[in-house]
Each structure stands twice: as C-alpha cells, then as structure tokens.
Amino acid sequence: MNQPRIVVLTGAGISAESGVRTFRDNGGLWEEHRVEDVATPQAWATNPEMVWRFYQARRRQLQEVEPNDAHHALTHLQNNLEQVTLITQNVDDLHERSGSSEVVHMHGELKTLRCEMSLRSEVRMEPSDLTDDVALCSCCAQPSAMRPDIVWFGEMPMHMLEIMNAIDTCDVFIVVGSSGHVYPAAGLVDQANNAGAHTILVNLEAPINAAAFDEVHLGPAGELLPKLVSTLLNDND
Ligand code: NAD
C-alpha cells in the first residue's frame, strides 16, 4: 500500500507544555508587549534596543526548555513514514531537539541571527551571543549589525513555495496548537481542503478556523498527539 503524504503545521500551542509561552492565550507574550512595539520592522527602525532585548530574552529562554511528548510524537511519525513534511510557525528549536529533520520554519528561528547587510543567517547561541549587547556579523569585511532572524508582522513568511507545493500534493494535513489568527499560516487548511486532503486539528480549545477541519481533537497536544500518531501509523500497517 502507498504510504500517505502527510503535512504537519505546528504553532505556539505545541511548545506550551514545554514552558514556552504562546502569544494569544492568558499569560501570553502579547499581554506584556504590544505587537507593534516588538515584532514589526517599524519597531526595529524606531526602538531597536527594546526589540533586541525582547528577542535576546526569548533566545536565552531556549536553553531552559525541553521538547515535550507532542514534539516527540511528530519525530516518531517522521521516523516511521517516508513522506512527512513538518512546517512550523514556531521560532524555537524544540522540533529539531526532539530529533525531527528538515523542519520548515516559516516565521524564522531564534537560534540564528541575520546580517542586515548580506542577509545571511548564522547560528549564534554562544553565551557571548546571548547578552543584551549588539551582535556583529562574521560575513562582511566591515562587520555589520545583526537582527533577530524572525519574520515580523508585515514581512513575507519564508519557504512559501515549498510549503504550497507540499500542501498541494498531500493526503493528510494536520495543524497542532495554532489560534488561526496569523495569515498566511491560518489559510493553509483551506488550500489543503481544496487539494482534497483530509484535514485534522489538535488544539487546546476551538480556534476561529476550527470549522474548516474534517476532524477536530480538543485538548493538550502532549496527550492527544501521541494517540493520533499511533492511529495514523496503525492505519498504515
Ligand atoms: P497563538 O499563540 O496565536 O495560538 C496558540 C494556540 O495554541 C491557541 O489556540 C491555544 O488554544 C493553543 N494551545 C495552547 N496550549 C496548548 C496545548 N498544550 N496543546 C494544544 N494547543 C494549545 O500561536 P500561533 O497560532 O502559532 O501564532 C502566533 C505566532 O507567534 C506564530 O506565528 C509564531 O511564530 C509566534 N510564536 C512562536 C512561539 C514559539 O516559537 N514557541 C511562541 C509564541 C509565539
């Protein structure tokens, strides 16, 4: 039997049980910071110190968190099926640290910084990279300032062609832990439905786009996703 082609899209909710705060739940990051103050190109242009401190704190927090059972379930799925594309809106590296490979980070990554001159990204997670001091690149003859390697509101998500192609050809599309507010990620379920895929949602509570899914599982991803992955793998036996 042909193996199903599966695309998984994860959002902040999959990392919540690891202790990484989401954006829109109670206690979420936006309660302390206005989006426009820390996550837009305008904020970087007008108050780079505040934006830098916000992301350096997020980068330091990466060292204090570990992948949870939901991340491990997706690694298990990738290890047991040939065609699983893992796309994440998350900027943490918990999928990679769980053992997942070729993770498509559509909103950038915390562990890298981007040279403002050459636009090249470098992994910068040494202790000296995690202070609130400005970081300089190692790629330009005259070292240039670096920015967080994050897709801010108003900027184009990364890898969109690869993402659209994967969804257009998938049999099953699974979304985990996403509030359905941030586009274009929130609209990918419509594309999957148009492509004829079976669409599945795993989320703590029903998000605004819940009606777009064929199958909805409400509860913590760390509990529900391992069961869903077992079912998918048994169905394929
Ligand atoms: P969001 O904060 O808007 O929504 C999170 C969703 O996850 C909510 O619907 C919530 O009900 C659900 N959720 C919370 N705990 C859960 C759990 N234990 N199990 C399952 N679901 C749970 O996040 P979003 O939709 O990803 O969009 C916000 C943007 O913020 C993203 O683009 C992302 O780049 C960024 N972000 C990333 C991180 C990270 O890297 N971990 C954290 C916060 C925000």
Image (cartoon, grey):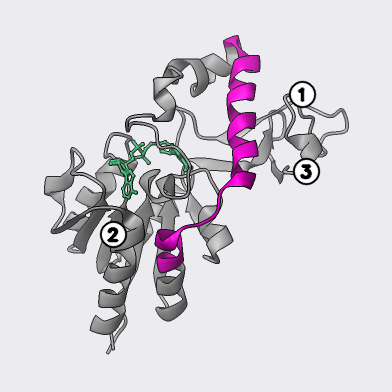
Residue annotated with mark 3: 126
Q: Nearer the viewer, residue 150 or 157?
A: 150
Q: Vertically, is 103 above or below 237?
A: above
Question: Dominant secondary structure of the magenta stretch?
Answer: helix
Q: Closer to the N terminus: mark 1 or mark 3?
A: 3
Q: Which mark is residue 133?
A: 1
Q: Is residue 7 left or right of residue 198?
A: right
Q: Vertically, is 230 above or below 36?
A: below
Q: Is residue 222 left or right of residue 120?
A: left
Q: Nearer the viewer, mark 2 or mark 1?
A: 1
- Using the rendered image of the protein, determine whether residue 226 is visible from the camera's viewpoint: yes
The stretch in magenta equals 46-74
Q: Which mark is residue 174?
A: 2
What's the amino acid at mark 2? Ile
Report the residue at 26% width, 39% height from top.
180
Distance between mark 2 and mark 1 Cα atoms: 40 Å
Q: Image quadrant for the C terminus?
A: bottom left
